[in-house]
Amino acid sequence: MTNIDFTSDDVRQSLLRFSLPMMAFALLDFAAMFINLGWLMALTDEGQLPATFRISIAVVSLLEALLGGILAAIYIYANQAFGRKDFVTARYLINFGFGCSILIALLIAVTGEATASTLIAWFGVDVDVKQQVLRYLEVYWLGYFAVTLHLYTGLLARMAGAVLVIRRFKLTTFGSAMVLSPCLIFAALRSGVDPLHAAAAALIGSRLCGLAVLTYDLARRKVFPFRLGVEFRILPLFAEWKAMVRLGGAETMNAFSLNLSFYLLYMLLSYFEAGTLEAVTISQYFSGFVQAVLMGAITSIIPFAAQNAGCGKIDNIATGVRWMSKRVFILCVLAMVPFMVLVPYFIHVFIPDPHVAAKAVLYIRITALPWAFLMASFPFLFAVIGLGDTRGTLLLTIWSMYICNLLPVVLVRAVLGGSMIAAAWAEAVAAVLTFAGCYGYYLRKETILLGARAAPAPDQPDLPNIPLLAGAAQESP
């Protein structure tokens, strides 16, 4: 195998070698998000499709957050074991994660349709849009099992730093989506089948194709130096069950809180001045493009921090997180400046009304540059997650999504009656405050860990192990 070792002391080189291809693969993932949307807009007369897909993502993410916390905990502990080269424990935890993925996917698939109907009903959009979301999700739930395993196996490939394997995985998923989406939607229209059903089926089919390729590579040991399987049993091989369950519960709270905040944010914006939700959506189409590309690199901080924590290399984490944050900020600024200049020339494609379009342009120009601070905060947040700091993750989620984001939106709606421009300034201030909170908390966490390493207990010279790091992560703020 030629996988990248996240625990190498040449931190910048390791992160750079992994980040560049991950950004390219993230670009494919982002483009794939618009394949279904683009073909539906081109071949059908369905209206408000961007809002349909936005609401679908918000609803599904909220349901996933309810049950995905234990997978996040397993992933972090598996990374820590893999980082200290404890392959026996890492293999068991990875296999146990497969077992949990199967159970979670089945549970969400069975309960998703009924639960989603209630969540969708709370959005302040047309009845037609709500029906479109329900139609799309009808088929999506049927293939949700494939979607979950596709996501989990992709995370495992990232854990191992298996760039070549990830490339085959991503290209197969994207290529199959490019073929399946137009073919199935066109065939559905010719045969009288709901095109939204066909679009969902195309997404599921592309996930199955990518999963098949990655499963083949896993079986040939191109990802890990050991074979993988499925495990449902709780074995004494892993001694930190209580700590991992606590971490899983906390991660569930964190993930649910984060996704609930997004759900509430979009719901609140749907009651704002006409064009507000459209302005946010258009802004996020471009910023989401940049974010998706950069997130391909930024999310590597989670396995990077966990693996280096597992072998006690706190200095590596400090170097890598700062390196990533600085470069993310610079790249975001460089990307948003031309977007601010060019947006008036194409916004009419999304918003025909010139008055609403003009306000949307101003909204985008107010929020574009501060958004770079928001992106630069993610490396610090992901480092906290990788360290297993459940309390810190929850505090930062509350700070960034509720205090900095939702609270200003509620106040703006109450005081100014849902002004689009006031909402823009609230978003801009929220981005800067989010960065300040994430950066400040990470600095404190780093100081605690470095202090613990510098003053080892007499009977425990090897402090940097999982229990210690988990305990250090639980220090009160």
Image (tube, grey):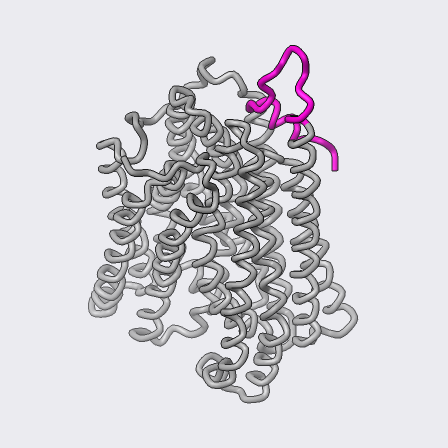
Q: Residue at x 53, y 71 (%)?
A: 336
Q: List x then y, in percent, for residue 192.
A: 24, 67
Q: Quadrant of the N terminus?
A: top left
Number of numbered markers: 0
Q: Is residue 216 left or right of residue 200?
A: left
Q: Is residue 62 left or right of residue 401?
A: left
Q: Residue at x 58, y 70 (%)?
A: 368
Which of these two is toward me, 35 or 273?
Answer: 35
Does the rendering let one see residue 106? no
Which of these two is toward me, 2 or 87?
Answer: 2
Farthest bottom residue in view: 354
User: What's drawn in magenta, residue-wise?
Assistant: 452-477
Farthest front residue in view: 10
Q: Residue at x 42, y 41 (%)?
A: 110
Does the rendering let one see residue 260? yes
Q: Is residue 44 above or below residue 138?
A: below
